[in-house]
Image (cartoon, grey):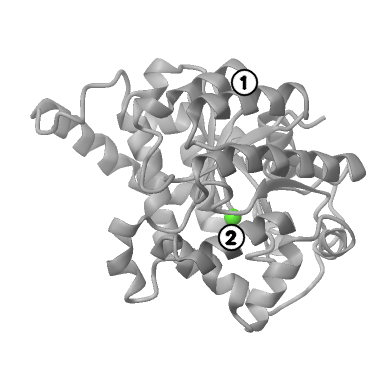
């Protein structure tokens, strides 16, 4: 029998466990970034996807939106209290989506540095509770590469977060590849996190309410990961490591058909944009990606992904504060897995991937 979903309203505290729980896709927002967002929303420059996402969270009087805005901006008492209540030992923090990627180039470059300094300060205040991923501005790939160097060597940050497309452009375009070169050179993983859908993709999702985290985010981020794979990025950067959340944005479940149709498409020479690459799409997924279960506290999906990716490549994430569901932690603790595999899932894989001591 397939276990059903937990009741999201339940707040049962998780029990003591013999491993640390490290949550690896946890969002924050410096108040100063929200000021920039407010100016973008007021000025009419914001695209429809951003307006639908942050326009909602920043102005809705709903309890959910108010709660999320309160939690996003706190990197001290409230967040630590929620971590204690949900049994989370450590959060790996990332600037909330879309981060700097909706800003103009100059603002994005300078605010990425401000956000990374802000994050590094929070980690210095709470070094046993927080680790973090640096934001970069894909709008300026050379500046992003420099910030990756600074983030790793000076700030001690543990990964790079990129919130999927940047104004409708994808990292599969070689103009962005300085970012991959820097991440590979500094052996720091890139977490490819969802963004609001680009304008030319939004309408059929938004008109039925499926554009957000419910479905559209996963479709668009999975597409982005596939574009990176089929563009040959990993042939060019053989040591590049990436992370995707939300149970791999369903790509493991697609893998058989992705491999079959990729081969058939390349062989038939149907697209100039789909050239031969050295391996099958599924091989790049299993060799270059790590997958977190953010937002998917569902044992059959976790186990399938572990079987597909290998036990070392599937990591725990909560997706705080967007999915602060205390009960899900206990449900994942209770998965029918040997203790050593649960320790890999909750703790040691995250320590290895993000180089957390
Ligand atoms: Ca998230």
The residue depicted at 39 percent of the width and 58 percent of the height is 197
Task: Please determine whether, in this image, residue 197 is positioned above or below residue 287.
Answer: below
Residue 19 in sight here:
no
Viewer-side label of 1, 2: 2
Q: Quadrant of ligand 1?
A: bottom right
SS label for mark 1: loop
Nearest the viewer among 18 and 108 is 108
The residue depicted at 42 percent of the width and 29 percent of the height is 176
Nearest the viewer among 316 and 341 is 316
Left/right of residue 206 with respect to residue 141 in the rendered view = left
- For label 2, the residue is 37
Nearest the viewer among 153 and 187 is 153
Residue 355, image x, y percentages:
73, 28
SS label for mark 2: helix
- For label 1, the residue is 187
Residue 83, image x, y percentages:
82, 59
Tell which circle, 1 or 2, labels the residue nearer the N-terminal end.
Answer: 2
Counting other residues with Cα less than 10 Å from the Cα at mark 2, is it few (<14), some (14-19), or many (20 or more)?
A: many
The residue depicted at 58 percent of the width and 50 percent of the height is 99
**Label ID, residue 112:** none
Q: Quadrant of residue 280?
A: top left
Q: Mark 1 to mark 2: distance in Å?
A: 32 Å
Residue 311, image x, y percentages:
59, 36
Say which quadrant the C terminus sits in.
top right
């Amino acid at each position: 029998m397939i276990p059903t979903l937990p009741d999201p309203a339940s707040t049962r505290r998780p029990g003591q466990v013999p491993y640390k729980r490290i949550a690896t896709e946890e969002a924050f927002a410096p108040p100063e970034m929200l000021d920039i967002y407010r100016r973008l929303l007021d000025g009419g420059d914001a695209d429809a996807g951003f307006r639908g996402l942050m326009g909602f969270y920043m102005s809705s009087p709903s309890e959910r939106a108010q709660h999320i805005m309160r939690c996003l901006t706190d990197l001290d008492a409230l967040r630590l209290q929620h971590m204690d209540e949900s049994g989370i030992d450590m959060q790996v923090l990332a600037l909330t989506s879309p981060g700097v990627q909706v800003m103009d180039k100059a603002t994005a470059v300078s605010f990425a540095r401000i956000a990374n300094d802000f994050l590094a300060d929070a980690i210095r205040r709470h070094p046993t509770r927080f680790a973090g991923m640096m934001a970069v501005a894909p709008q300026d790939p050379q500046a992003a590469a420099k910030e990756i160097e600074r983030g790793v060597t000076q700030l001690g940050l543990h990964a790079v977060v990129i919130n999927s497309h940047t104004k409708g452009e994808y990292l599969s375009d070689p103009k962005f590849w300085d970012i991959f070169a820097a991440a590979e050179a500094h052996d720091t993983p890139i977490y490819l996190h969802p963004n609001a859908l680009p304008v030319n993709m939004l309408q059929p999702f938004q008109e039925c309410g499926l554009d957000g985290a419910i479905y559209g985010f996963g479709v668009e981020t999975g597409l982005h990961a596939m574009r990176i794979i089929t563009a040959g990025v990993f042939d060019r950067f053989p040591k590049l490591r990436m992370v995707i959340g939300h149970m791999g944005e369903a790509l493991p479940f697609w893998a058989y058909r992705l491999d079959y149709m990729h081969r058939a498409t390349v062989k038939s020479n149907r697209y100039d944009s789909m050239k031969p690459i050295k391996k099958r799409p599924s091989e790049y997924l299993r060799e270059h990606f790590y997958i977190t279960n953010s937002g998917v506290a569902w044992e059959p999906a976790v186990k399938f992904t572990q079987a597909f990716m290998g036990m070392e490549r599937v990591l725990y994430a909560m997706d705080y504060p967007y999915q602060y569901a205390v009960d899900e932690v206990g449900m994942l603790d209770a998965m029918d897995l040997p203790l050593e595999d649960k320790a890999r899932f909750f703790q040691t894989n995250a320590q290895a991937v993000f180089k957390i001591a």
